[in-house]
Amino acid sequence: MAVDSSLDVQLIAASTFRVPTGVSWAPDAQATDAEAIVEFAGRACYETFDRPNPRTATNEAYLRHIIDVGHDALLEHATATVYIRGLSRAAGNELLRHRNFSFSQLSQRFIPDGESEVVVPALIAEDAELREMFLRAADETRFVYDELLRALENNLAGEPNSLLRRKKARQAARAILPNATETRFVVTGNYRAWRQFIAARASEHADLEIRTLAITCLELLRGSAPTLFDDFLVSDLADGSQMATSPYVS
């Protein structure tokens, strides 16, 4: 029986900062490592480690000024890595379009035996009859996949390398699997790329699944660099879903 997989996103790595030797500067105590990196990079451009401008003397004020004037190239010095589970292959294909990220994706050349995991679209999941129909179709597809796999392995019986034989069979049989099949990613991006992703995909015009992913990532990243993401306003839509917008990112 097909299993309905739920979105799970975890922050598994983020940049750390160390003040270089020979520099008479220390970040604000409340600044996170990512926020300290961005400020240091900006101050290094002009050697303003003595904080000559009182309006941008604090880390928070400095970062807000950077975002306000659009000097967001500085955000590329800090990075964050997330582990994503419970995303459909369809949404995964949309995620892969963001080429400023680095990706490692679950390989379909190895799909464990047993129950198949699929992501049921929200519009289908909210209707019990449609959800049952969807999961039944996923089961039927998995049945065909298993039949194809067995037949392909028989056809490749002459291949002496058992590992290669199994890979060839799986990579051919996987073509029948639906877009709803669950996939998993490790995604690394700098904070500028993350802001651009959230601005594009947390929009009310984005597909609901990837919009949910974008807002989930936003909430995680706010924990590691709140000042760099608190310009995004999360609001509720009429259908109960959420969107996020920022006046600084188009």
Image (cartoon, rainbow, N blue to C red):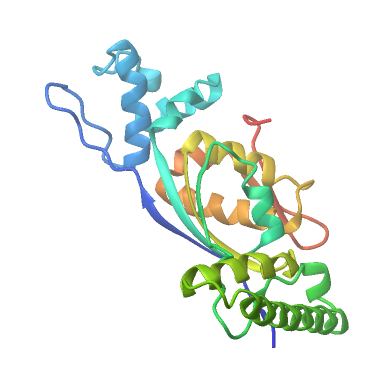
Q: Is residue 110 visible?
A: no
Image quadrant containing the N terminus: bottom right
Q: Residue at x 32, y 19 (%)?
A: 43
Compared with 126, 232 (above or below) is above
Where residue 90 appears, as percent x and y from the top left, is: 72, 58
Q: Nearer the viewer, residue 231 or 166?
A: 166
Where residue 228 appears, as percent x and y from the top left, is: 48, 37
Where residue 84 appears, as percent x and y from the top left, is: 53, 61
Quadrant of residue 51 within the rendered picture: top left
Compared with 162, 107 (above or below) is above
Quadrant of residue 246 within the rendered picture: top right
Q: Residue at x 48, y 75 (%)?
A: 162
Where residue 18 appears, as percent x and y from the top left, is: 21, 36
Q: Nearer the viewer, residue 233 or 121?
A: 121
Q: Nearer the viewer, residue 137 or 134?
A: 137
Count the numbered circles shown. 0
Q: Is residue 249 visible?
A: yes
Q: Residue at x 35, y 27 (%)?
A: 39
- Left or right placement of residue 126 versus residue 60 in this view: right
Q: Residue furthest front?
A: 158
Image quadrant containing the C terminus: top right
Q: Residue furthest bottom?
A: 1
Compared with 173, 242 (above or below) is above
Compared with 89, 218 (above or below) is above
- Left or right placement of residue 172 versus residue 65 in this view: right
Q: Residue furthest left?
A: 22
Q: Residue at x 34, y 24 (%)?
A: 41
- Left or right placement of residue 23 versus residue 185 in this view: left
